[in-house]
Amino acid sequence: MEPLAILLAIPLAGGLALWVLGERDSAPEVNAAFSFATFAAAAWLTSEVVSVGPVMGLYEQFFVDPLNVFLVALTAFVGFTTSLFSRPYMRIERDKGRMTAARLRLYHSMYQVFMFTMLLALTTNNMGILWVAMEAATLATVLLVSVYRTAASLEAAWKYFILCGVGIAQALFGTILLYFAAERVLGAEGNALLWTHLALVKTELEPAIMSLAFVFLLVGYGTKVGLVPLHNWLPDAHAEGPTPISAVLSGLLLNVALYSVIRCKVLADGALETRFASNMMMAFGLLSVVVAAFFLSRQRDIKRMFAYSSIEHMGLMTFAFGMGGPIANFAGLLHMTVHSLVKSAIFFAVGHATQKAGTQVMEDIRGLLQVSPTIGWGLLIGTLAILGMPPFGVFASEFLILTTAMRDQPWATPILLLALGVAFAAVFKRVQPMVFGDTTHTPFTHQPALTPVFIHLGLGLMLGLYIPPYLAAWYAQAAKLLG
Amino acid sequence: MNPLSTQLVNLFASLLLLIAFGMLAQRRIVTLIHLFALQGLVLTASTVTVAYATGQGHLYWSAGITFVLKVVVLPYILHRLIRRLNVKWDIETLINIPTMMLVGILLVVFSFNLALPISEFSRSIARGTLGIALACVLMSFLMMITRSKAVPQVIGFLAMENGLFFAATSATYGMPMVVELGIALDVLVGMVILGVFLFQIREQFDSLDIHHLEKLKDE
């Protein structure tokens, strides 16, 4: 209980403290310190769950089991490294005059609030609070997307707000239907929305209500996952917001949204005893992979391109969880981990590359290796990793997903392979001239923070070559939980 | 549950639907806000009726929250907003109100069909209400799609939340208190952020016409 309370209290206190302190020179360091404390609390919680099993707290309102504890650890870790990256990045933005003191204050405070809402969404046991936390995560980031106050960023934020707001309203309707179904079994007390209670009686839930509830929940949370055709907000929000926000949106928020969908799927599967929920997820997942792959080649903005790549990968995970079974679930969880590590690393490198070139248009970014070998190699290695080149972790998880698809859903394999091939060609063609080639740009005023890039890529590499036994056991346990 | 309160809830449900149609056809922004406040009032009345008829004490609290939030606070913020943004007397040119009404009727038919198999399981008061709630949600959605000004879009967004709240009280006897409080907080914070946002949009574009916000596209 204690580590859980501390884990949630730190980012909340951080958000308040950074708001009260206001903008000052040390604010980025304070932000990083709070993020580090959150990460330490998450590590403590993880060790607790590993040694004594699932943790409950506050009248069963909070619940940490093998499935969410690894996402908590991942979220806190990426949150911490992103705060490290954001220190020099935001200083450069301030020097360029794009960030004023008031905006920086908002940025740092909301960064912590955003971390809080995601950790709350992950650890809550109450499906209603899950909804509240997901909505709050949107609210915390919407002003960050529009923080530059340019016409494009305002448009992106407006789209983000309205589309995600409408989407999440569908999820609320789904939650109401879920409660409606649960209340008939569990009675009308507060317990009827607790996931652990629902999971115990999932076979008794009324199938007619649950199938409709799942459709609404999938559409609602699927909007936040960025599933095609509900993905329109995602490329804009990623391209127009500050890059650290793109990194946490892609690396963390999409994961948390997918986590919500998976929790709902477990309940729907139990109630329906058909493959209805699985088929829905597979259809949405496959459509996202294919559409995103073909959109990749049409992008000119580098952050937009990697946003589409996120849609593609989220589609792949949704497809994997849709297939179900221990191996596909294992692969889906592994893919969640490596995607968020590698994609955030790419955004770190992209952030400095675009600051350097002063533009996000790919044709104008050239010769990164000459400007800064670390940025160039970071981007190149990250791109190869995200495209599924061995020996990185993405290769391992994609390989597992594809082989399971060959066995269980052979019809989908050629489609997936084609999409992955198209994505590879599209992205590599763009990145290669950006990394190599000539340039006339001058060096940086601030030392870029590239340690996070290589820590992430190193972890992604490690997960491709060797998954530590306790981690593998952990994934397997979580995969079993998903059925 | 006595027949009188069932009839009352049915009456409030049909009033909600009527207001939803009214919003769909209303051009004046200030009248839209009045309609929104009226919708909140009907919602409060129906929640109180359900609370009284079923003896669920916590529903009085959620009726109270609804009243404060949706009849007093949100309309007040909206009024202030349109006054400061100087759009109080704005009239939107809506194309084809009769067509919108017809689409609205189709949405109602669709919602009733969708809700029919589920309503049978409802132990609570009125069976038709789930269909009506869904219809209100979809019609607010339609309103958001068809409006070109930012403020009516925001009102559509809030009206959608009203429909969802009505679904929660009519299908089940309200959600657990902690969830309702959380939702109310989200709506309030969302409204404040939207307000900030509208000023930013106006500052940037000198207008609240969201046609300005259609530049970002994939080439």
Image (cartoon, coloured by chain):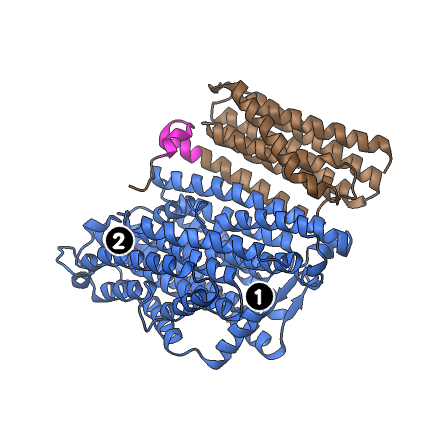
Chain colours: A blue, B brown
| Residue A15 showing in the rendered view | no
Indicate the quadrant containing the N terminus of chain A: top left, top right, bottom left or bottom right. bottom right
The spot of residue A290 in percent (x, y) is: 37, 52
Indicate the amino acid at tag 1.
Leu
Q: Secondary structure at mark 2?
A: helix
Label 1 neighbour load within 10 Å: few <14, some 14-19, many 20+: many
Subunit that carries the residue with mark 2: A
Q: Quadrant of the C terminus of chain A?
A: bottom right
| Circle nearer the viewer, 1 or 2 | 1
Mark 1 vs 2, N-terminal side: 2
- Asked whether residue B207 is in view, the answer is yes
Q: Amino acid at mark 2?
A: Gln
In the image, A381 versus B131, the foreground residue is B131
Q: Which residue is mark 2?
A: A355
The alpha-carbon separation of the residues under discs 1 and 2 comes to: 42 Å
Q: Position of residue A398 (x, y in %)?
A: 39, 66
When the figure is inspected, residue A181 is found, relative to residue B142, above or below; the finding is: below
Residue in the image at 53% along x and 41% along y:
A166
**Residue appearing at x 70%, y 43% in the figure:** B118
Residue sitting nearer the eye, A264 or B91: A264
- Circle 2 crowding by C-alpha within 10 Å: few under 14, some 14–19, many from 20: some
Magenta residue span: B199-214
When asked about the image quadrant of residue A269, the answer is bottom right
Residue named by callout 1: A482
Judge from the rendering whether residue A338 lies leftward or rightward of residue B17; answer left or right: left
